[in-house]
Image (cartoon, grey):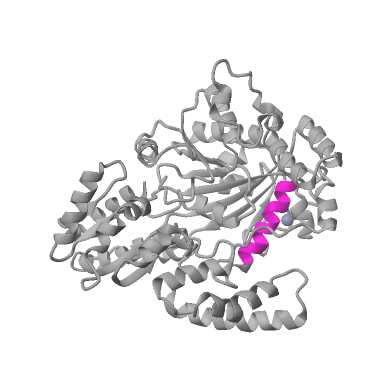
Amino acid sequence: MLICSWDKEIKHWLPGALANRCVIMSSMSSEKQTQQINSFQVAKANGLLILSYETLSRNIEHLKRKGPYQPYGLLVCDEAHRLKNPETIQFKALYDLPTVSRIMISGTPVQNVLKEFHALIDFCIPQCLGDTKAFNKTFGRPIERARDVGATDKELTRGKEANDLFNAHVKEIMLRRTNETIAKFLPPKEDVVVFCTLTKRQQQLYTETCQNNAVSSFVRISNLKKIVNHPSMLQLGDDAPKQSFRGRPPPFDYSQSGKMLVLMDLLESVKRRTSDRFVLISNFTSTLDLFQQMLDQKKLTWVRLDGSANANKRQTIVDNFNGDPSCFCFLLSSKAGGCGINLIGGNRLILFDPDWNPATDQQALARVWRSGQKKKCFIYRFFATGSVEEVVYERQLSKEGLAGQVVDDNSEARKFSSEELRQLFRPNFATFSSMHDSMGCTCCETVAEPSSVLPEHGSTTSVDENGFLHLKPGSHELLAKDECLGCVQRHVSLVFVRTTDLTSQAPPPARCEEVEEDEMGVSDDADETDDVD
Ligand SMILES: [Zn+2]
């Protein structure tokens, strides 16, 4: 999958390297693979080899034969977080490959613990941060201890010192790029948070589940997350296999789910008004199954990508969607969505349920709002009002806020305290949004008519600390921001909207004699696009 993407980008940005490039697809026979490596190794200059980690591991002995007296000039590792564990065969094989320089590219350099980040840096520049033991003593343990809920003042101080020192080191060797860096080269984007009220049936099931002390908190939370997607998810298990619907599918009633009602109203509203297309993302493949059924009922076209497709098939599905304007929806499981997939054929993306790890959501968003996208983008996040999903989102926001602290540390959701659990199992359906309540925002209090303008956030200058406007369904402001969503009112309790539009800051189009220089500039930014993947 990524092999094809890289080959395409080389063709686009480095046409001079085309003549001497060798691309190894995993589908090639081993003879063909050997032949490609041979022709790469005999290339005198500017040779370029593109291959997957798996193919490289299989052919590592062959590739090492070039060294040790003739090292390769440059090794570039995309999705470098795959090398976070120095104990793996893959890591060891690559580590020994004789190279002059190494570049690691990753959208999530720190996924869980700093130890993994150390492994990546050590792969790139051996001993730069000391060996594992020294690193843990100086940086790892103090920083992680300070992040503990019960950290003492002394531990906090030590953690801060270690953190500052760590960042000073890292700044020398790491180039950090966020999506905002390339925003001025991208079309405008609306981030839209949609709070959807549950149906009566969902509320009843939800309350019953909260009160069921017979099962563990973990099981209850997991069941709550299913109920808010659709009541039938409770019977489907965590990740029901696709074939559970082979034969005659059970009649599916999406109107039992508040979020699905909003989803369908939005899809139909967009279909009526625009030629825009959608990417629909869920953490549950069983929810994708339900999407398929509701789209089929409405005769809306879709393709689907989840973890079950192999690399070649994935690329075909992606190309089919991007190249076929009549294909309305791309159904994507968030676990399959993180790795470099380019879905610029769609410009409206819906995250149907939130993930504890904000990096997963962030990666999903970058599928459509990226280099090559020409249309204005709408990124919707759906949350069931007053439910566990709002808690997940609140945690995400606090973690996104911490991102600058240590690179992009997205440590796993810490365990809940017993008070937090009590809170979690106390559903609050009589609200526009429980998260909004806890923000202490009063914009809703004086609003009697759902369609009237919110007094506090009625003007575009008044936004919350995350840059969002708070808008009522059907309000004039919302209609102005997103006419298609503005027309959807059933089961929508509140909408947050944040506009990103930096297009006016983009450099003016180059004059003829400057074209060459300008192309170089744009080329730099293409690298940054890959960086955020
Ligand atoms: Zn408000």
Q: Is residue 397 magenta?
A: yes
Residue 76: where, in percent of width, then height? 33, 64
Name the one closer to the observer, 348 or 290: 290
Q: Considering only vertical position in the picture, is 261 above or below 403?
A: above
Image quadrant assignment for residue 149: bottom right
Residue 304: where, in percent of width, then height? 47, 34
Image quadrant assignment for residue 57: bottom left
Name the one closer to the observer, 125 or 371: 125
Location of the C terminus (image quadrant): bottom left
Query: Which quarter holds ligand 1?
Result: bottom right
* Horizontal arrangement in the rendering, residue 358 relative to residue 443 (left or right): left
* Horizontal arrangement in the rendering, residue 157 relative to residue 516 (left or right): right
Q: Main secondary structure of the magenta part?
A: helix
Residue at image coords 64%, 22%: 252
Residue at image coords 63%, 84%: 161
Name the one closer to the observer, 47 or 229: 47
Residue 278: where, in percent of width, then height? 49, 39
Residue at image coords 21%, 73%: 69
Total number of numbered labels?
0
Residue 150: where, in percent of width, then height? 78, 71
| Range shown magenta | 388-401
Q: Considering only vertical position in the picture, is 156 above or below 363?
A: below
The reply to whether residue 175 is visible in this rendering is: no
* Horizontal arrangement in the rendering, residue 27 relative to residue 223 (left or right): left
